[in-house]
Image: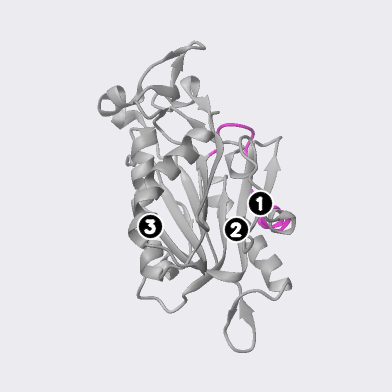
Amino acid sequence: MLEKFKIGNWTDGKSKTGVTVIIAEDGATGGCSIKGAAPATRETDLLRTDKTVQKINAVTLSGGSAFGLEAACGVMQWLFENDCGYDAGGYKVPIVVGASLYDLEYGSFGFPDKAAGYEAAKSADINNFASGNVGAGTGATVGKIFKMKCAMKGGLGVHTFEKDGLELAVFSAVNALGDIVDENGKIIAGARLGSKHFIGCAKFYSAYERFLKRQNTTISCIITNAKLTKEQANALADKAHDGYKSAISPSHTVFDGDAIFVMASGEKKVDFNYLISLIPDLTASAVRSAFI
């Protein structure tokens, strides 16, 4: 499925960080929505509906906080060497957007650099739905209401969907301040006292807000074979944040840089209202799958 996309990961087991790249060599209609207040992002202005460029070649999700944005330069280099990009006249310029999450305190200090991004792009292949402690999820943690001492390991969550020719996949590097909850609101991962007792981040958020730091973020990319306009791709990314609200408690805090990207390859005509109705649950499932 999703034959127009290639997915690659680079994982640093020593520094506990990594990068995940989703590539559309022929280009894909792009969109994004950022609702966290502390994002680290690259080229997101290009995805606004009033901007000229309509298609993107890659989304890069990385650890390393703002340092990790460098990984996208390696992805760009690989795409350039493989003749992919926006025809600017004399040269093709690869359009690479991305976001990074803060994982600098989980392992030793390190971040995905240009070489890491290049290797992730070089390794990319179709139907690579690896999840867990891989790529951008390598250094992810959740439940940081009392900082790292009570936090629990996060990861890269992946959820796929296929019906009547419509294909989607959601990739989520889950590094939230809050807890991860199931469909009934029960905590399945988050801040803990000991090995089993969950504290409940939401009930302490207001009381401890002044002690918290901007060191969190859940970043995602939705890929689909649906035929979408740029406006629809942005609307889909915006609606997907409802999945964050369902699976993360609390979500979209001032200490999270929550961002969601969309890439649509355009082979399948679809009722957009149907697609919009699907995406919150698919995104929530991707977030939760990082802990299964």
Rendered location of residue 176, percent (x, y) = 44, 36
| Residue 106 among those drawn in magenta | yes
Residue 38 visible at all: no
Residue type, numbered disc 3? Leu
Q: Is residue 279 left or right of residue 127?
A: left
Distance, label 3 to label 1, CA atoms, is: 22 Å
Q: Front-most of 233 and 250? A: 233
Q: Nearer the viewer, mark 3 or mark 2?
A: 2
Q: Main secondary structure of the magenta part?
A: loop
In the drawing, what numbered circle is on residue 127? Answer: 1
- Give the quadrant of the N terminus: bottom right
Q: How many marks?
A: 3
What element does badge 1 sit on?
loop
In the drawing, what numbered circle is on residue 65? Answer: none
In terms of sequence position, does the residue under pointer 3 or pointer 1 come before the other?
1
Residue type, numbered disc 1? Asn
Residue type, numbered disc 2? Leu
Label 2: how many Cα within 10 Å (few below 14, some 14–19, many 20+): many
Q: Quadrant of residue 238?
A: bottom left
Label 1: how many Cα within 10 Å (few below 14, some 14–19, many 20+): some
In terms of sequence position, does the residue under pointer 1 or pointer 2 come before the other?
2
| Residue 129 among those drawn in magenta | no
Rendered location of residue 266, percent (x, y) = 51, 69
Rendered location of residue 43, percent (x, y) = 48, 65
- Give the quadrant of the C terminus: top right
- In magenta, the rendered stretch is 103-119
Residue at the spot 43% in from the left edge and 28% down from the top edge? 144
